[in-house]
Image (tube, rainbow, N blue to C red):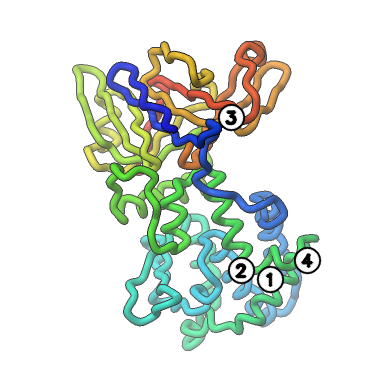
């Protein structure tokens, strides 16, 4: 059955697909715990590589280890395949100004157009320093020409040195772990698919019109935000400006997200011009967790909140003063809400409950890349 679209004023909430038992269909399935490395384990593994590089006094051995570290960093942070890294030309395929890798499709390395994979500024700087210190004459072309069996052997060794099963350190596992990390950090699913090189990104709503360039811009915004981490906002949506309605002092901006959610925000006219907003521009919308109000679904919605999203309670963390809820939306996006524990007792929500997550237009902060 379908939960019908509800409207508050001119704002429509997102429809949620339900099964016959009233449970939400998952948009993606995260591998079972133990089948991939989580963010903390990935960080630990990365530190192990760095310590390994610095542990030898011999410069030639250090350079050889740096090549393995460089291959690891590319796979760990971009999710590309090992054979895609080993065919890279450091001169032609890494653009340090645009912060991108140019990857040839592994199944057709002659006629298939290259796809671009975004790098964070921090990773780009480190890669540039490592490569510029290693490239000497003809060594430039052969930097990534390493036997894949040797690379796998070293990847297994580093995983076991951290106490992980060696298969969790394999390139395929790192690629899977990066994909899970991106999804758990709320990168839109179509953007994850594009970044990992899946052939057809699946937009969750047919009426959402995002070009390949729009999705690539979303990836760039996400990667820089992930690397920077200077915001305290827990909830992030990536979308495109759909409509702008300017008033005397403030402007109402409507966004359409990659997941098919229509969000409304109100900003000052000065912010509109400072951010350079226009219809079609890709932006980031952030909402702090305390600004998200929860209400059980199945009840009439009576609220002044312009933004009403339907989801399922996925996690509850109760403290003495506050209680934190994580709500999973149909497209896989996680929304965090923090309420007082007294309010939580009145809500009486349990894991698996269908609920509405609501926030008003003044709670949405826009960021433009």
Closer to the chain start, of discs 3 and 1, is 1
* Label at residue 32: none
Q: Where does residue 38 sit, x and y in percent of width and height?
A: 66, 51
- Residue pointed to by mark 1: 155
Cα separation, mark 3 vs mark 1, equals: 38 Å
Q: CA distance from mark 3 to mark 4?
A: 36 Å
Query: Looking at the image, do the residues carrying marks 3 and 4 touch, with CB atoms under 8 Å apart?
Result: no
Q: Could you tell whether 213 is left or right of 93 in the image?
A: left
Does label 3 or label 4 sit earlier along the sequence? Answer: 4
Q: Which residue is mark 4?
A: 160
Q: Are marks 1 and 2 in contact (CB under 8 Å)?
A: yes
Residue under numbered circle 2? 171
Nearer-N-terminus badge (4/2)? 4
Per the image, label 1 sits on a secondary structure element best described as helix
Mark 2, residues whose alpha carbon is within 10 Å: few (<14), some, or many (≥20)? many
The x, y position of residue 211, in whole percent, is: 28, 52
Residue at position x 61%, y 62% from top? 174
Image: 8 above or below 282: above
Would residue 135 appear left or right of 208 to someone viewing this image? right
The number of numbered badges drawn on the structure is 4
Of marks 3 and 1, the one in the foreground? 3
């Amino acid at each position: 059955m379908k939960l019908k679209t509800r409207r508050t004023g001119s704002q429509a909430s997102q429809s949620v697909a339900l099964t016959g038992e009233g449970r939400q269909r998952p948009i993606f399935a995260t591998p079972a715990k133990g089948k991939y490395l989580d963010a903390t384990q990935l960080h630990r593994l990365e530190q192990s590589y760095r310590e390994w590089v610095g542990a030898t006094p011999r410069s030639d051995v250090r350079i050889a280890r740096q090549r393995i570290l460089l291959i690891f960093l590319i796979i760990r942070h971009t999710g590309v395949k090992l054979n895609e890294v080993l065919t890279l030309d450091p001169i032609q395929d890494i653009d340090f100004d645009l912060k991108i890798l140019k990857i040839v499709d592994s199944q057709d390395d002659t006629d298939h157009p290259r796809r671009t994979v975004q790098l964070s500024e921090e990773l780009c700087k480190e890669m540039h320093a490592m490569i510029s210190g290693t490239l000497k004459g003809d060594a430039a072309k052969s930097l990534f020409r390493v036997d894949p069996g040797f690379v796998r052997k070293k990847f297994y060794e580093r995983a076991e040195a951290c106490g992980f099963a060696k298969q969790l350190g394999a390139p395929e596992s790192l690629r899977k772990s990066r994909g899970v990390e991106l999804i758990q950090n709320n990168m839109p699913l179509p953007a994850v698919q594009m970044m990992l090189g899946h052939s057809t990104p699946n937009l969750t709503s047919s009426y959402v019109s995002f070009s390949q360039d729009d999705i690539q811009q979303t990836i760039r915004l996400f990667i820089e935000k992930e690397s920077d981490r200077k915001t305290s906002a827990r909830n992030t949506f990536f979308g495109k400006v759909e409509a702008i309605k300017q008033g005397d002092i403030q402007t109402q901006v409507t966004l359409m997200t990659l997941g098919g959610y229509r969000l409304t925000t109100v900003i000052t006219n000065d912010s509109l011009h400072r951010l350079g907003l226009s219809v079609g521009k890709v932006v980031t919308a952030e909402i702090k967790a305390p600004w998200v109000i929860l209400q059980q679904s199945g009840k009439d919605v009576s609220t002044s909140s312009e933004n009403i999203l339907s989801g399922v309670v996925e996690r509850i963390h109760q403290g003495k003063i506050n209680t934190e809820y994580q709500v999973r939306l149909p497209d896989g996006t996680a929304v965090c809400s923090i309420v007082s524990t007294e309010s939580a007792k009145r809500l009486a929500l349990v894991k698996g409950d269908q609920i509405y997550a609501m926030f008003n237009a003044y709670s949405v902060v826009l960021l433009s890349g």
